[in-house]
Amino acid sequence: MAGTACDNGPKARNGAESLAATQNLAKRLAVVVVTYRRQHLLGELFDSLAELTTHPWCIYVVDNENSQDTQTRVRDFGERLADAWGEPDDGAERVVYLPQSTDVGGSAGFNAGMKRAYHDGAEWFWLMDDDVAVLPDTVETLAPWTDVHDVIQGVRFDLFGEDLPQPRDLNVAFGTPVLSPPRFGRAGYRVTNAVCPERLVYGRS
């Protein structure tokens, strides 16, 4: 089961606790991006990542096209973040480029990125495709839930800022997804048995 967090729960309103959790999450948070022939969208994702008010430890870009264009964009992005954020304290690369010899698809691409991030010492993994953008305060929003959930899935919004309907549960008997609103309630989260790798955050354990 995964906890789907939002920022309207009592836990997220505790400022001191949230700050400590945010710093702890960011210290070893690895962003894993899988891309294939969508450099213009990847550039938009890079722009949004650069605007994060709390920056992650490292970003891993898995390139299923093995494109020179993508490699150049990743290199430039890495230099941009190094100038803005500085280098990680442990000397790791801020942005790591992982070209694949063939198009291995999304799941194998995530596996390649997570394997490298795990080897490098990541404690939290934040997965995303190349056709999304993140909100500036996303790390702060997710962080308060990391001490009570091992898997967290944030909500997704459309271009108008509305919560995008999505499968939040799986009817096991029929094998079909059930579309439902978040209904976070007083707890500030709800438990789900269906997750999407596009915005999944989960711990090393």
Image (cartoon, rainbow, N blue to C red):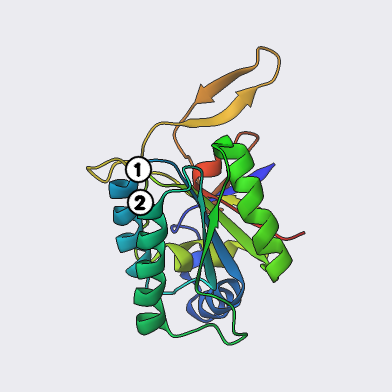
Report which residue position mark 2 lands on: 42
Specify the farthest residue to the right: 205
Q: Position of residue 190 (x, y in %)?
A: 58, 44
- Residue appearing at x 28%, y 48% in the figure: 40
- Residue appearing at x 41%, y 80% in the figure: 82
Report which residue position mark 1 lands on: 38
- Residue appearing at x 56%, y 35% in the figure: 105
Where residue 21 sits, quadrant-wise, is bottom right
Closer to the camera in the image, 147 or 84: 84
Is residue 20 positioned above or below 146 on the image? Answer: below
Q: Secondary structure at mark 2?
A: helix
Q: Is residue 21 left or right of residue 172?
A: left
Of the residues shown, which amino acid type is indicated by label 1? Arg
Q: Is residue 160 left or right of residue 171?
A: left
State yes or no: discs 1 and 2 in contact (Cβ < 8 Å): yes
Q: Position of residue 169 (x, y in %)?
A: 59, 29
